[in-house]
Image (cartoon, grey):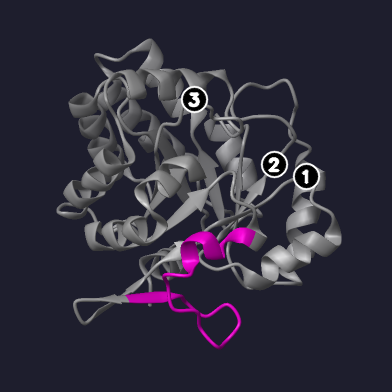
């Protein structure tokens, strides 16, 4: 059983959504970034999305774009990100998903990326600009199960590891394509809560419509459904957590790092503590 599967079983038993945090690796600079992420993992995150900075982050809003620019300027790379995973794994058991664009993975080589990521202790990858139907660009190096929704594994040095390709469903995804994505999904599905890019509030979340969409998808899959984009406050976490299996928050962390880089380690940890206090379902 993978770390992701165990985590979602745990949060279901605790009657709450999993708290999933996205943090750009290398922001504001490499050493301090690791300290911030280490503190976040110890403060109550259930799952970490470790963001690999890219020069053209088209799915991300200004806050994460600025974070990526600072991280690249500091010298952050995909290989450094994998080293972060290895160091984090010495202290933390939470699932770690590498959140990237395809260009850095392609430049490294997809086979090398999978093997090094798995060796370091990563549990999967979310590749924003690699469509679901092209997931084999990466997952060809991972053993595909015969049973739908079974866990995908890779064996390295006689040890079996689970490795997931996290797929996204957007508000613009039609029903036919949505069902195709759900058919091949594993780990969890990232359900984009609204149109637009990450961060900001120019497009408000239609909570009732999102809840209805999640309910429809539950008829198609047993894979956990997690909501992200525009989730920035404890109130958002509380609302989304009443119907989603996981709640993803990212730009709010990067805003703290941008505005208070010298105290971000404690501030991010305190913010996570605040979020977890509101992340409990009634009944």
Q: Is residue 20 above or below residue 28?
A: below
Q: Is residue 258 above or below residue 184?
A: above
Q: Tag 1's secondary structure?
A: loop
Query: Looking at the image, is 182 positioned above or below residue 40?
Result: below
Q: Secondary structure beneath disc 2?
A: loop
Q: Which mark is residue 193?
A: 2
* 179 vs 141, nearest the viewer: 141
Q: Dividing the picture into quarters, in which one does residue 143 lie? A: bottom left
Disc sitting over residue 171 in the figure: 1
Residue at 77 percent across and 66 percent down: it is 179
- Inspect the magenta stretch and tell me whether residue 31 lies in it: no
**Residue 214 position by quadrant:** bottom right
Q: Position of residue 206 (x, y in %)?
A: 79, 37
Residue 64 numbered mark, or none: 3
Question: Is any atom of residue 41 visible in this view?
Answer: yes
In the image, taking residue 12 as reference, residue 219 lies left or right, namely: right
> In screen coordinates, is 22 left or right of 169?
left
**Secondary structure predominantly adopted by residues drawn in magenta:** loop
State the separation of the CA atoms marked 1 and 2: 7 Å
Segment colored magenta: 134-154
Q: CA distance from mark 3 to mark 2?
A: 17 Å
Q: Is residue 14 visible?
A: no
Other residues around mark 1 within 10 Å, as few (<14) / some (14–19) / many (≥20): some
Which of the pair 280/218 is nearer the observer?
218
Quick one: label 3 or label 1, which is nearer the N terminus? 3
Q: Is residue 118 above or below residue 65?
A: below
Q: Quadrant of the C terminus?
A: bottom right
Tell whether label 2 touches label 1 (CB within 8 Å).
yes
């Amino acid at each position: 059983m993978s770390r992701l599967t165990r985590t979602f079983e745990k949060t279901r038993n605790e009657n709450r959504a999993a708290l999933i945090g996205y943090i750009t690796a290398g922001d504001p600079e490499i050493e301090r970034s690791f300290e911030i992420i280490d503190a976040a993992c110890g403060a109550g995150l259930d799952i970490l999305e470790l963001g690999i900075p890219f020069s053209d982050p088209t799915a991300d809003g200004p806050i994460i774009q600025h974070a990526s620019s600072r991280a690249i300027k500091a010298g952050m790379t995909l290989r450094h990100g994998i080293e972060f995973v290895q160091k984090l794994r010495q202290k933390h058991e939470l699932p770690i998903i590498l959140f990237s664009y395809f260009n850095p993975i392609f430049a490294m080589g997809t086979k090398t990326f999978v093997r090094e990521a798995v060796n370091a202790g990563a549990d999967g990858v979310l590749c924003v600009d690699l469509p679901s139907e092209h997931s084999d660009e990466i997952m060809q190096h991972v053993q595909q199960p015969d049973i739908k929704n079974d866990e995908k594994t890779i064996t390295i040095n006689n040890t079996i590891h689970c490795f997931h390709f996290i797929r996204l469903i957007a508000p613009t995804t039609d029903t036919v394509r949505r069902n195709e994505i759900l058919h091949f999904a594993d780990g969890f599905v990232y359900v984009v809560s609204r149109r637009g890019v990450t961060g900001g509030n120019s497009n408000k979340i239609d909570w009732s419509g999102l809840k209805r969409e999640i309910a429809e998808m539950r008829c198609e899959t047993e894979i956990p459904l997690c909501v992200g984009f525009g989730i920035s406050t404890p109130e958002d976490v509380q609302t989304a957590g009443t119907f989603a299996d996981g709640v993803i928050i990212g730009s709010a962390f990067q805003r703290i790092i941008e505005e208070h880089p010298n105290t971000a380690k404690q501030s991010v940890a305190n913010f996570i503590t605040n979020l977890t206090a509101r992340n409990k379902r009634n009944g």
